[in-house]
Image (cartoon, rainbow, N blue to C red):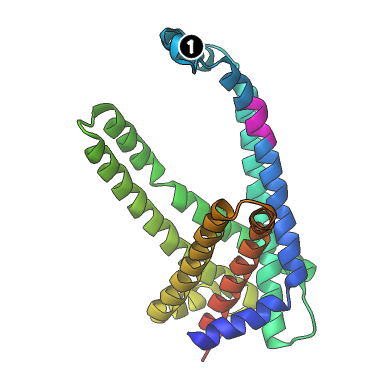
Amino acid sequence: MRSHIAQGWRLASKHMHLVLLLFLYQLLWGVILYRLIDSTVAPLLRRFPGTPSSQHALHPFMTEAQFHLFKTELITPYLWVIGGLFAARMLITPLFNAGLYYSLHHEMRDGGGTRFLEGIRKAWKPVMLLYWLESALVLAPAYWLLPKGMELVLHSTSLADLATGILLGAACWLLWAGLLQLLFLAMQLGAVTGDGMFRTLGRAASRFLSYASLSLLMWGSGLLLSMVISGLSVWMAGLIALILHQSFPLLRTLIKVWTIASQYNCLQSK
């Protein structure tokens, strides 16, 4: 496992400009979502009766909000915007993935620099189809889990029962999403490298213990680092905390690329 992580770091370090590009891509999405939420939610919050003296106005506020949501077309433009952003992300993200996977493969096999744009041209179709299929399967449990969650919220007799039911459902959903991510990453890498999707999937299944352990170690390390930096940002309020907080998204993108490179090396090792 240590060799896979070391080789993954070697590959990731040769793609620092792609790390920067992916960071800017994620930053752009964050800015767009922030502006959308701020322009939508902030005007509503300014009308929210939040002071103790205005608690009697809460029920009329909620009634008015329910009327506008379900009896008018007020929400329709926002749904179109959210749907358009979701569609754009579903189209653009697989292109970045195809370029990154292809470049990692050729850097490990041939060396001589990255091939991001070439990877997009040659491998975008299978990567995009697999990405769409993975997203559909990840979202599929929402058809059953979200109604169950609403039923728990409405009919739970205690907060402990509500928390237990929601946490159990969320844990199962997270486990399902993690398993799909591992399997579909293997198939996407197989499509990019030319080994074949199902051949690489079989290789991932035969090495699943080491493959999953490596992935959990890298994911856990990223989560632990995120918690440490968040804690330091609170504890060391000031310039250092601001620098840590602002630089962490770039570090998180680097860890993501490092993780993918390590997973690729695990699947390609003899």
Q: Is 39 displayed left or right of 47 in the figure?
A: right
Q: Mark yes or no: residue 141 visible.
A: yes
Q: Which residue is mark 1?
A: 61
| Residue at the image position 79 percent from the left and 85 percent from the top | 112
**Residue 12, horizontal then vertical, whole percent:** 67, 76
* Above/below status of 223 relative to 55: below
**Count of numbered labels shown in the rendering:** 1
5 left or right of 12 in image: left
Where is residue 178 drawn, in percent x and y? Answer: 44, 61
Q: Quadrant of residue 196?
A: bottom right
Q: Is residue 126 visible?
A: no
In the depicted structure, whether residue 263 falls above or below residue 140: below
Residue 177 position within the rendered picture, expressed as x and y whole percent measured from the top left: 43, 57
Q: What is the chief secondary structure element of the magenta stretch? A: helix
Residue at 57% of width from left, 21% of height from top? 45
Instruction: Specify the amino acid type for callout 1.
Output: Phe
Give left or right: position of 246 versus 3.
right
Q: Quadrant of residue 43?
A: top right
Q: Find the residue positioned furthest to the bottom.
A: 270
Could you tell me which residue is drawn at 33 percent across and 37 percent down?
149
Task: Please tell me which residue lies in front, 229 or 258.
Answer: 229
The front one of 269 and 238 is: 238
Disc 1 is placed on an element classified as helix
**Residues in magenta?**
35-40
Quadrant of the rendered structure where residue 192 is? bottom right
